[in-house]
Image (spheres, helix red, strand yellow):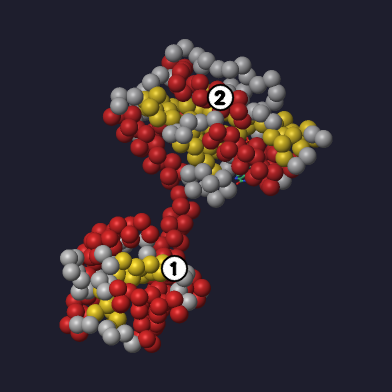
Amino acid sequence: MPSRQDILNAKILVVDDSPDNIELMEEILREEGYTCVSSTMLPEQVCPLHREHNYDLILLDLQMPGLNGFQVMKGLKEIEQGGYLPVLALTAQPSFKIAALEAGARDFISKPFDLLEVHKRIHNMLEVRLLYKELAQYSKAQQELALHDALTGLPNRRLLEDRIETALQHANRSHAKAAVMYLDLDGFKAINDTYGHAYGDDILKMVSQRLLSSSRKEDTVARLGGDEFMVVLGDIHTLADAQGPAAKLVEALSEPYFINDLTLRLSTSIGISIYPDDAETVDALINIADYALYEAKRAGKNRFCSPAANRQGGAKMPAPAEKPAAELAVPHR
Ligand SMILES: Nc1nc2c(ncn2[C@@H]2O[C@H](COP(=O)(O)OP(=O)(O)OP(=O)(O)O)[C@@H](O)[C@H]2O)c(=O)[nH]1
């Protein structure tokens, strides 16, 4: 629920062709404690001003020369996509009241002003408007949560599948390829088992950061869950365009992780599938990358594998790790 202070700090625009009316309304609002009030006598300025300032309330005179209040509301409807016009119509004409409500105004204030009515209607209108904004923000945050992993903030599987689909469509249009890289940390369970879940969580967050900073802005880095991540590269042309980044990721994730006074090491394995060479659908590309990941694990971990490389006569891989897949802690004092 918005507080009284939120309501007094709401952004209000007064629109009237009479300077006396504007002065009177501004004074009424100032005396009540409203802090963010502006005004215009030019109806054609209302839409551009609202686009810029996103007012919480527009006190709109209905009878003005040039554009009248009804025409202004028509313009405002195009800006307010949710269809909620934050308009309180000001009118001396009883017959305009219903017409104003039908045109989208939330409420009206009759002229000449009755002070008590003005205060109540403005307060009520702002309360609803601010609640409406809170609700919109909350629902946006919920949507974000539904598409992102809570621990790392990376896209989750649902958003990832959309991103892969988009990358495939783009590759298709530009006669390019795309790569799906399935990553799984090596020996991550031992970190959890030895140092506890909190250390494991820290590693997962650091891994996410390293994946992001080792990828291009236009690539998608996602967490599928547990110690599994995915990186999607769009707009590539050869298998080597995926192998280079894969080698970079293997390298970046094998750098030591400093957590509290420990130095932890672990490596990662990656399976790569290429669109359209290996498959043409999202599910099939993920399954093939998963199988290639299994091959990378079986071949000794800390490496990447792909069916395309096998077809070309053996995976071209960086030398396998000199260190074990997951080496536990070395204190770093
Ligand atoms: N800290 C932490 N651990 C998690 C989370 N989700 C899953 N895990 C753990 O991650 C581990 C993943 O295990 P695996 O991938 O099977 O084990 P691994 O040791 O990496 O095995 P290899 O992949 O064969 O090297 C399990 O111990 C899970 O309990 C999480 O959000 N936080």
Q: Is residue 158 left or right of residue 209?
A: left
Q: Is residue 116 left or right of residue 104?
A: right
SS of the residue under disc 1: strand
Residue highlighted by disc 2? 248
Q: Residue at x 36, y 82 (%)?
A: 118
SS of the residue under disc 2: helix
Q: Residue at x 41, y 67 (%)?
A: 11
Mark 1 surroundings within 10 Å by alpha-carbon count, few (fewer than 14), some (14 through 19), many (20 or more): some
* Location of residue 116 with respect to 2 vertically, above or below: below
Q: Position of residue 98 (x, y in %)?
A: 20, 80
Q: Which mark is residue 36?
A: 1
Which image quadrant is residue 16 in?
Answer: bottom left
Outermost residue, top side: 313
Q: Nearer the viewer, residue 18 or 87?
A: 18
Outermost residue, right side: 333
Note whether residue 147 is visible. Answer: yes
Which quadrant of the frame does ligand 1 lie within? top right
User: Which mark is first along the chain, 2 or 1?
Assistant: 1
Q: Is mark 1 within 8 Å of ligand 1?
A: no
Q: Nearer the viewer, residue 71 or 33?
A: 33
Q: Position of residue 10 (x, y in %)?
A: 44, 69
Q: Nearer the viewer, residue 6 or 226?
A: 6
Which kind of residue does numbered mark 2 sit on?
Lys
Q: Position of residue 128 (x, y in %)?
A: 39, 73
Quarter holding the C terminus is top right
Q: Residue at x 45, y 21 (%)?
A: 241
Which kind of residue does numbered mark 1 sit on?
Cys
Q: Is residue 8 left or right of residue 69?
A: right
* Location of residue 15 with respect to 98 vertically, above or below: above
